[in-house]
Amino acid sequence: MRTMMLLLLTAAILSAQEKETKVSFSKDVMPVFVKKCLNCHNTEDESPSGLYLDNYKELMRGDSRHGPVVLPRKGAESVLVKKLLGTTDFGRPMPRGRKPLEPETIEMITRWIDQGAKNN
Ligand code: HEC
């Protein structure tokens, strides 16, 4: 019984640590934008929404009409995350016209915002 409890405790601690893993903008988040979003949200072609995802600065500047799409430390409230979940009250879910991102990918982006949305 005691061994069982210890095992459970260790598993809980390990998974808590995993949740805390630092997310990197350049290594983790940006590659998702490159693969799934840049064909529409890039500065070369005019982005239909006025939101450019070419780099950190553009992302943080947000969209021309709705303002910032990233609210540091408030992942769940950020328009970026809501768009990926399809829960905004305007427009379509992102990536538009394609299948949604994997839940783990959305969770990773949410975690990056919750960790302060740093240019790391
Ligand atoms: C096929 C083109 C296309 C792709 C691919 C696409 N978007 Fe969009 N995006 C749009 C259009 C058009 C709008 C404006 C209309 C709307 O809100 O649905 C928009 C709007 C948005 C907005 C809201 C901006 C605002 O505040 O008004 C966010 C955030 C966003 N996209 C993020 C993403 C992310 C992240 C990806 C990649 C996972 C992505 N988009 C992929 C076309 C696209």
Image: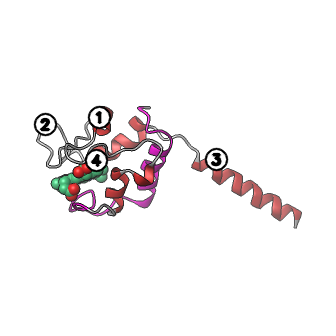
For marks 2 and 4 on the same chain, the one whose residue lies earlier in the sequence:
4
Q: Quadrant of residue 24?
A: top left
Q: Marks 3 and 2: CB-CB under 8 Å?
A: no
Instruction: Name the residue that disc number 2 marks.
Output: 44
Amino acid type assigned to the residue bearing label 1 in the image? Asn
Instruction: Name the residue that disc number 1 marks.
Output: 55
Seen in the picture, residue 24 relative to 13 is either above or below; the reply is above
| Residue under the point 25% across and 37% down | 54
| Residue under the point 48% across and 38% down | 116
Crowding near pointer 1: few (<14 within 10 Å), some, many (20+)? some
For marks 3 and 4 on the same chain, the one whose residue lies earlier in the sequence:
3
Residues under labels 3 and 2: Cα distance? 40 Å
Residues under labels 2 and 1: Cα distance? 13 Å
Q: In the rendered structure, which segment of residues is drawn in magenta?
A: 90-119
Amino acid type assigned to the residue bearing label 3 in the image? Gln
Q: Nearer the viewer, mark 2 or mark 4?
A: 2
For marks 2 and 1 on the same chain, the one whose residue lies earlier in the sequence:
2
For marks 3 and 2 on the same chain, the one whose residue lies earlier in the sequence:
3
Amino acid type assigned to the residue bearing label 4 in the image? Lys
Percent position of residue 52, x then y: 22, 41
Residues under labels 2 and 4: Cα distance? 16 Å
Instruction: Name the residue that disc number 3 marks.
Output: 17
**Element assignment for label 4:** helix
Q: How many marks?
A: 4
Amino acid type assigned to the residue bearing label 2 in the image? Glu
Instruction: Name the residue that disc number 4 marks.
Output: 35
Q: Marks 2 and 4: CB-CB under 8 Å?
A: no
Q: Nearer the viewer, mark 4 or mark 1?
A: 1
For marks 4 and 1 on the same chain, the one whose residue lies earlier in the sequence:
4
